[in-house]
Image: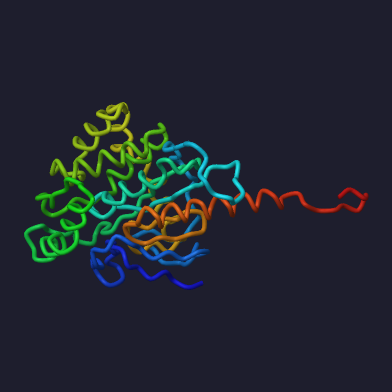
Amino acid sequence: MTDPTTTGPTMTDPTTTGPTMTGPTMTGATTTGAKTTGPATPGPATPGPAANDRATDHQATNDPAKDDRAVSSAPVKIRIWSDYVCPFCMLAEGPLEEAVEGLGVDVEIEWKPFELRPHPHPTLRPEDEYLPAIWQRAVYPMARRMGVDITLPTVSPQPYTRLAFEGYQYAAEQGKGAAYTARMFRAFFQEDLDLGQVDVVVRLAEEIGLDGETLRKALDDGTYTAAHQDALREAAAHSIRSVPTLLVGDTRIEGVPSVPQLRKAILDAQAAQAEQEAVQGAACSVDGGC
C-alpha cells in the first residue's frame, strides 16, 4: 500500500514528529484503496478490535446525479476522524456539506474520535509561539476564503478532549453524533469554552436536546470510557496520524478536502458498491443451478 501524500492542512499526532501542520491549501491528497490496518497507536490506545459504527445520523438524499455509472442501493459511508481542538476539522465541515448537497447520492457521515494530544502528553498553549504562528499562516487565511468565523481560543493550556469524546459516544448512541460534534467545534472556536470541563460538556449536550443529568452520571461513572478506547483503537487500525482524515469507501483523504475531490470520491464509492452488489451471488452450483 502506498501512503497518501498530504497536501491539505492537517494537525498531526505528536507521538510521531510533534504537532506540525502542512500548508494552507484546500486540496488534500487522495489515494484509492488506501484503507490501512497498520499498528500505529495514538497515545495510550493499543491495537484491538475496531469499534462498531455508531453515528450514522447525517443522511442526505437529493435528485439523481447526472452520472452514467451504476448506482448502489446502499448509502455511501464517509468516516471522518477529527479532534475538537483542531481548527482544520471544523473547516472541513463546509466542503463536506457542500459536496453532498445536490449530488443525488445517499450518504452517511460519521465523525470519528482521535485525540491529538492524549493524557499525559502536554497540550498546546495559545500564548506560546506555535499556535499564533500557524493560525496566522494557515488557519485564518483558509477561514476567510471559506467565510467561516473562527478564532484562536484563549483557553490555556488547551483542554484534553477525552471527556468530550466520551460525551460523543452518548450523543451518537442517541442519534445526535453529528450535531454534538458541530456544537463542540463552535463552543471551542467561536465561544472560547473549555471542553475539558464536565459542566461545559453537559450544558452543550443539553443545548442539542440530550439529557444532561444522564450524561453527567455517565461521565462520572466512566460509562463510555471503553467505547471511546475502542474508537481510538479503530483509528489506530486505520493508521490515523493526522486530522482531519476521511475515508470515503476505499478512498482516503488527509487534510481539508475540496468539494470536487469529495464528490468524485463519493461517486467512485457508489460505483464500487454497485459493482460489488452486481457480482454477489453470481455463481453456479453442483446441482446445475446458475
The answer to whether 112 is drawn above or below residue 2 in the figure is above
Answer left or right for 135 relative to 70: left
- Residue 12, position as x, y percentages in the image: 29, 64
Q: Quadrant of residue 4?
A: bottom left
- Residue 228, position as x, y percentages in the image: 38, 47
The answer to whether 193 is drawn above or below residue 23 in the figure is above
Q: Viewer-proximal residue, 7 or 172?
A: 7
The answer to whether 289 is drawn above or below residue 36 in the figure is above
- Residue 173, position as x, y percentages in the image: 42, 35
Answer left or right for 171 relative to 54: left
Q: Quadrant of residue 135?
A: bottom left
The answer to whether 254 is drawn above or below residue 153 in the figure is below
Q: Viewer-proximal residue, 220 or 256?
A: 256
Residue plotted at (45% across, 39% down) = 56
Q: Viewer-proximal residue, 226 or 52?
A: 52
Question: In this view, which residue lies farthest toward the left?
Answer: 127
Q: Quadrant of residue 11?
A: bottom left
Colouring scheme applied when the structure was drawn: rainbow
